């Protein structure tokens, strides 16, 4: 018997988004995907940063909201008859881009925005060593450039794995 339900990608359609808000109002956790295509947006997908802003306005707690990127995972493509025609990879930078939109366009605090992308997802997935900087945690984090929204370093397990030259 399932003991854990986590609806993901609930911003794919307006109806699914509204269902997700109802689920969250009843205490559930919801997830918005940041990987998208122009075709999905044209068909009514709620942009992830807008979805976060609307959920927070609906008084959903940040601890109930997560963002996921599906980076390098598949984004299916369909023709006019909704027949599958191919796959595109999710973009690696989509999560970072949406965080910037949350903060800069929707004026969501950096703390609330980061919680959606880090701690909330880790808690939902029951990964106690992820999503936070704390003694005994994995020390996965990014370092942003001063004065601009750009990644200077990426750290994983306490080691630099990427650095801008």
Image (spheres, rainbow, N blue to C red):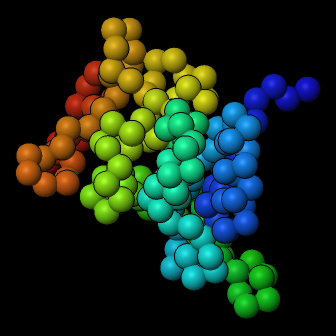
For the N terminus, give its image quadrant: top right
Whether residue 156 is situated above or below residue 41 in the rendered picture: above
Q: Is residue 32 left or right of residue 5?
A: left
| Residue sitting at the far top | 135
At horizontal 73% and vertical 91% (from top left) the residue drawn is 80
In-front residue for pair 105/82: 105
Whether residue 43 is situated above or below residue 135 in the rendered picture: below
In-front residue for pair 134/75: 134
Which image quarter: residue 139? top left
Image coords of residue 35 (percent x, y):
51, 61
At horizontal 57% and vertical 50% (from top left) the residue drawn is 58
At horizontal 63% and vertical 55% (from top left) the residue drawn is 9
Q: Is residue 34 left or right of residue 4?
A: left
Whether residue 1 is situated above or below residue 161 in the rendered picture: above
- For the question of whether residue 87 can be seen, the reply is no
Which image quarter: residue 12? bottom right
Image coords of residue 17 (percent x, y):
66, 59
Whether residue 98 is situated above or below residue 163 in the rendered picture: below
Q: Is residue 87 left or right of residue 112?
A: right
| Residue sitting at the far bottom | 80
Q: How many marks?
A: 0
- For the question of whether residue 160 can be seen, the reply is yes
Image coords of residue 136 (percent x, y):
38, 9
In-front residue for pair 14/98: 14
At horizontal 63% and vertical 44% (from top left) the residue drawn is 30
Which image quarter: residue 98? bottom left
Q: Is residue 54 left or right of residue 1?
A: left
């Amino acid at each position: 018997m399932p003991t854990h339900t986590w609806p993901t990608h609930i911003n794919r359609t307006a109806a699914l988004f509204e269902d997700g808000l109802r689920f969250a109002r009843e205490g559930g956790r919801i997830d918005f995907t940041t990987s998208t295509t122009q075709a999905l947006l044209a068909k009514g997908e709620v942009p992830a940063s807008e979805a976060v802003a609307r959920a927070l306005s609906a008084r959903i707690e940040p601890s109930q909201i997560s963002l996921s990127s599906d980076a390098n995972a598949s984004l299916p493509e369909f023709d006019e008859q909704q027949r599958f025609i191919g796959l595109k990879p999710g973009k690696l930078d989509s999560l970072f881009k949406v965080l910037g939109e949350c903060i800069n366009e929707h004026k969501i605090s950096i703390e609330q925005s980061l919680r959606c992308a880090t701690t909330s997802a880790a808690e939902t997935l029951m990964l106690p060593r992820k999503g936070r900087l704390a003694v005994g945690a994995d020390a996965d984090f990014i370092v942003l450039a001063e004065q601009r929204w750009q990644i200077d370093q990426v750290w994983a397990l306490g080691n630099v794995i990427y650095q801008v030259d």
